[in-house]
Image: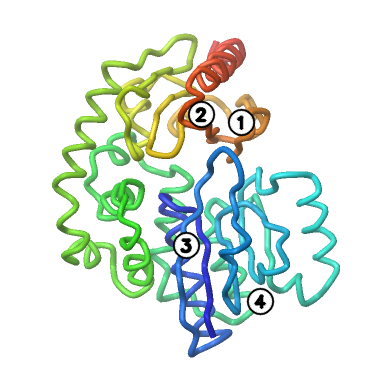
């Protein structure tokens, strides 16, 4: 049996979800299956290619819903999980069929897709989650930004933080398929000692220091919202907590960056803010207006690389809205 697992690429929770799905599927569904891992990214234009859904089972974890009949499993926890109202209706209609209902799951109340998948696997299929307890705990910490302090998120002391940096930065298409199975087989410290991971760390740590310096130079905080534009320094990801490490007084941040395949607006909120949650703006709802999405406290929008002008205009509008609604005023 061939199983293709489509997961949110360049994302710690996405990688953990993919690994957990593999272990759950192998232990509870098909003991002799072979697994392939395919990363999905939010980009301008189509997110899925129907021709890629070639497995006997095709699973999507930690990513938007696809109505394709070839998708046999789906797990997600994002508020903006559906590209269209038609997709949402398709999902709800499918829930009326017991066979579909036991394969496609959605709950935006979960901190991470990994913890959601672990709960479903345990309660619906009898999967033993004890061996993956640390994986689930760190997926919640990383995806929910549940760090003790900005320093713990930025200074890279914990093995999970170094691993997050590697996952968000790698450009080698062979790297993630090699890494994902290890996430439910080894401790994070043991994974970091694997040569194909260990050899990447010195260069990535230096790039992290450079990103910290660059954002320090480019960012400013006014009326509770940080803004920076580093599109002239293409990066394949950076630590999203750097803005709050540099500007701990901020409530929100809006950052413009560019990678090899998109220009991105990252819209976030300070995990350590003293502002009460009920006073915060729903960032997923803002990002959805521009074709993006995410969670209530963090979201993003993708534009084609040649559309920097549209990205800057959207960022300008979002900044104005957030500053006008600064809950700390």
Of tags 3 and 4, the one toward the viewer is: 3
- In primary-sequence order, the first of circles 4 and 2 is 4
Give left or right: position of 282 versus 243.
right
What number is the disc on residue 58?
none
Give the label, 4 or 1, closer to the camera.
1
Task: Identify the residue under disc 1.
Answer: 287
The mark nearer the N terminus, 2 or 3, is: 3
The residue that disc 3 covers is 38
Q: Secondary structure at mark 3?
A: strand
The one nearer the camera, 47 or 64, is: 47
Q: CA distance from mark 2 to mark 1?
A: 8 Å
In the image, residue 49 lies at what x, y percent?
Answer: 59, 57
Dots 2, 1 in contact, CB < 8 A: yes
Quadrant in which the C terminus is drawn: top right
Image location (x, y in percent) of residue 232: 33, 22
Rendered image: mark on residue 267: 2
Judge left or right: residue 190 versus residue 272: left
Residue 97, given in percent of the width and then of the height, sits at 83, 72
Residue at point 32%, 40% (across, down): 153
- Mark earlier in primary sequence (4, 1): 4
What residue is shown at x 56% (from left), y 84% (from top)? 28
Q: Residues within 10 Å of mark 4 (few under 14, many from 20)?
A: few
Helix, strand or loop at label 2? It is strand
Q: How far apart are the two marked residues, 3 and 1, measured between alpha carbons?
A: 25 Å
Q: Quadrant of the N terminus?
A: bottom right
Say which of 203 and 25 sits in front. Answer: 203
Lower position in the chain sequence, tag 3 or tag 1: 3
Query: Which picture quadrant has residue 195?
Result: bottom left
State which quadrant residue 55 falls in.
bottom right
The answer to whether 49 is drawn above or below residue 240 in the figure is: below
Question: Marks 2 and 3: CB-CB under 8 Å?
Answer: no
Label ID, residue 124: 4
């Amino acid at each position: 049996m061939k199983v293709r697992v489509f997961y949110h690429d360049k994302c710690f929770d996405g990688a953990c979800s993919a690994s957990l799905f593999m272990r759950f599927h192998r232990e509870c569904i098909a003991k002799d299956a072979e697994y392939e891992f395919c990363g999905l990214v939010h980009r301008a234009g189509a997110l899925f290619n129907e021709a890629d859904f070639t497995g006997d089972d095709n699973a999507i974890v930690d990513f938007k819903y696809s109505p394709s009949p070839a998708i046999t499993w789906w797990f997600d926890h994002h508020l903006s999980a559906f590209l269209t109202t038609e997709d949402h209706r398709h999902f709800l209609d499918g829930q009326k069929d017991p066979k579909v209902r036991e394969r496609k799951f959605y709950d935006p109340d979960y901190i991470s897709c990994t913890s959601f998948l672990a709960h479903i696997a345990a309660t619906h299929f009898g999967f033993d989650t004890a061996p993956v307890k640390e994986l689930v705990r760190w997926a919640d910490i990383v995806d929910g930004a549940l760090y003790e302090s900005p320093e713990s998120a930025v200074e890279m002391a914990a093995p999970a933080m170094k691993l997050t940096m590697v996952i968000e930065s790698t450009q080698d298409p062979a790297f993630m398929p090699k890494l994902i199975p290890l996430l439910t087989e080894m401790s994070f410290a043991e994974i970091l000692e694997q040569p194909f991971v260990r050899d990447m760390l010195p260069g990535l740590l230096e790039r992290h220091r450079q990103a910290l310096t660059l954002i320090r130079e480019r960012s400013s905080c006014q009326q509770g919202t940080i803004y920076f534009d580093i599109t002239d320094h293409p990066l394949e990801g950076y630590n999203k907590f750097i803005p709050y490490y540099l500007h701990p007084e901020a409530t929100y941040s809006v950052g413009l960056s560019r990678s090899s395949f998109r220009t991105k607006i990252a819209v976030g909120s300070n995990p350590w803010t003293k502002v009460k949650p009920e006073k915060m703006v729903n960032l997923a709802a803002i990002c959805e207006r521009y074709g993006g999405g995410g969670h209530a406290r963090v979201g993003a929008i993708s534009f084609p690389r040649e559309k920097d002008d549209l990205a800057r205009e959207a960022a300008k509008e979002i900044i104005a809205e957030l500053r006008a609604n600064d809950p700390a005023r």
